[in-house]
Image (cartoon, grey):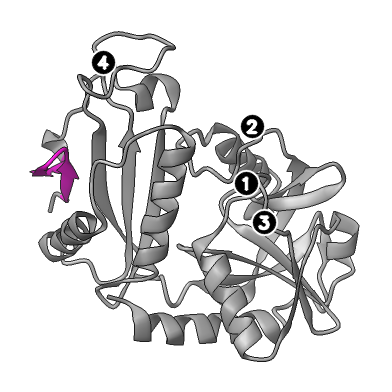
C-alpha cells in the first residue's frame, strides 16, 4: 500500500507528490529537516523538534511557514492515514522554487517555501538487535561545514561516512576534528569512564540533539554524573563503555572503535539502563 505524504498543504499518495526541479532544496541543499520518532502511535519529543526546527530556520534567515499547532495536526493526520505504530515522521522545509537557479535567495513574498512530511515505519524501533549487541564504529576526519548546529539537508559527507563504515565492516563512523570526537554521522557520541558519562559540549560543532537533551536530563535525574567536554578516540577506546543517541536509535551501545573493543567488548550497564529509562519516560510524555 502506498504511503500518504504531505506536500504543500495536500495529502497525496507518495507516487503523486511532485516538486519542481528548481526547488532550492534540490539545487542548493537550502533547507532544514527534523525527524520525530513515533512510539506506540504517538510522537516523541515533539515540542523539542519544533523548537529546534524554528531555530534552524532562523539561523538560515528562512521563514517558518507553519505554526506548532498546524505541524501537530499534520503529524497526527499522517500517523492516522498511514497506520503508523513505530517509526518516525520526516519533515523538510526548503526556501522554495523560484523558477530558475540563482545563488541569491528568492523573495519570500513571491516564492513560497516547500514543506514535505512523510512517515517511515520501523517495527524494530524498540527491539533493534543493535541495541542488544551494540555497534562498531570507525573514526574519520570531520570534513563538514562549520554550522553543524543547524539541521540542514546537506548530508553528503555524513552519508559518505556511513559508506566508509560499511566498507570497513562496521555500523557507523565517529567524526574527529582537531584531535577530538565531535559526533557520529547521524547521532551524538558518548563515553563512560568510572561511572561518569562524558559527551561533547554544545556549540556550533555538533547538532543540539533532542534525544541528547532528554537522555542527559534523565541521567542527571537518576543521579548519574555527566561531564560535557570534548574527548579523543584514544580516550574512547580506553573507556568502560560508549554509546550513541538519536531519534531513530534512542540509546545504543558502542562496543568497538577502530577495531579496539570498548570495555569487555559487550554493552555495559549504563547505556542499556539509559535506554530503558528513555523509552519508559518517552512513553509517558509522547503525544
Q: Mark 2 or mark 3, which is nearer the start of the sequence?
A: 2
The residue where tag 4 is placed is 98
| CB under 8 Å between discs 3 and 2 | no
Q: Residues within 10 Å of mark 1 (few under 14, many from 20)?
A: some
Q: Is there any visible trace of residue 224 in the rendered image?
A: yes
Corner quadrant of residue 120: bottom left
Q: Secondary structure at mark 4?
A: loop
The residue where tag 2 is placed is 145
Corner quadrant of residue 75: bottom left
Separation (CA) of disc 1 from disc 2: 23 Å
Q: Of the residues tagged 1 and 4, which is closer to the observer?
A: 4
Residue displayed at 60% across by 34% down: 157
| CB under 8 Å between discs 1 and 3 | no
Q: Which residues are magenta?
A: 3-14
Separation (CA) of disc 3 from disc 2: 16 Å
Left or right: 47 as drawn, with respect to 6:
right
Q: Of the residues tagged 3 and 2, which is closer to the observer?
A: 3
Corner quadrant of residue 135: bottom right
Separation (CA) of disc 2 from disc 4: 25 Å
Q: Of the residues tagged 1 and 3, which is closer to the observer?
A: 3
Q: Secondary structure at mark 1?
A: helix
Q: Secondary structure at mark 2?
A: loop
Residue 286: image x %, image y %? 33, 77
In-front residue for pair 147/12: 147
| CB under 8 Å between discs 1 and 2 | no
Q: Residues within 10 Å of mark 2 (few under 14, many from 20)?
A: few
In the rendering, which numbered label is found on residue 166? 1
Residue 95: image x %, image y %? 33, 28
In the rendering, which numbered label is found on residue 202? 3
Residue displayed at 36% across by 60% down: 36
Q: Secondary structure at mark 3?
A: loop
In-front residue for pair 118/57: 57
Amino acid at each position: 500500500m502506498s504511503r500518504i505524504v504531505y506536500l504543500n498543504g495536500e495529502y497525496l499518495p507518495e507516487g503523486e507528490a511532485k516538486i519542481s526541479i528548481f526547488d532550492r532544496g534540490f539545487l542548493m541543499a537550502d533547507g532544514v529537516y527534523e525527524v520525530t520518532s513515533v512510539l506506540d502511535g504517538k510522537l516523541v519529543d515533539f515540542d523539542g523538534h519544533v523548537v529546534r526546527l524554528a531555530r534552524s530556520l532562523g539561523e538560515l534567515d528562512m521563514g517558518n511557514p507553519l505554526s506548532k499547532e498546524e505541524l501537530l495536526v499534520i503529524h497526527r493526520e499522517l500517523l492516522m492515514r498511514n497506520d503508523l505504530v513505530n517509526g518516525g515522521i520526516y519533515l523538510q522545509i526548503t526556501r522554495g522554487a523560484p523558477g530558475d537557479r540563482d545563488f541569491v535567495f528568492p523573495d519570500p513574498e513571491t516564492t513560497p517555501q516547500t514543506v514535505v512530511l512523510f512517515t517511515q515505519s520501523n517495527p524494530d524501533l524498540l527491539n533493534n538487535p543493535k541495541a542488544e549487541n551494540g555497534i562498531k564504529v570507525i573514526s574519520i576526519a570531520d570534513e563538514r561545514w562549520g554550522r553543524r548546529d543547524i539541521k540542514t539537508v546537506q548530508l553528503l559527507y555524513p552519508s559518505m561516512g556511513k559508506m566508509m563504515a560499511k566498507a570497513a565492516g562496521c555500523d557507523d563512523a565517529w567524526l574527529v576534528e582537531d584531535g577530538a570526537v565531535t559526533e557520529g554521522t547521524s547521532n551524538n557520541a558518548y563515553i563512560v569512564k568510572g561511572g561518569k558519562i562524558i559527551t561533547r559540549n554544545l556549540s556550533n560543532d555538533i547538532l543540539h540533539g533532542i534525544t541528547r537533551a532528554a537522555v542527559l536530563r534523565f541521567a542527571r535525574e537518576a543521579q548519574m554524573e555527566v561531564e560535557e567536554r570534548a574527548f579523543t578516540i584514544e580516550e574512547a577506546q580506553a573507556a568502560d563503555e560508549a554509546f550513541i543517541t538519536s531519534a531513530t536509535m534512542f540509546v545504543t551501545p558502542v562496543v568497538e572503535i577502530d577495531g579496539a573493543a570498548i570495555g569487555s567488548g559487550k554493552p555495559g550497564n549504563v547505556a542499556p539502563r539509559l535506554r530503558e529509562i528513555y523509552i519508559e519516560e518517552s512513553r509517558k510524555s509522547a503525544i
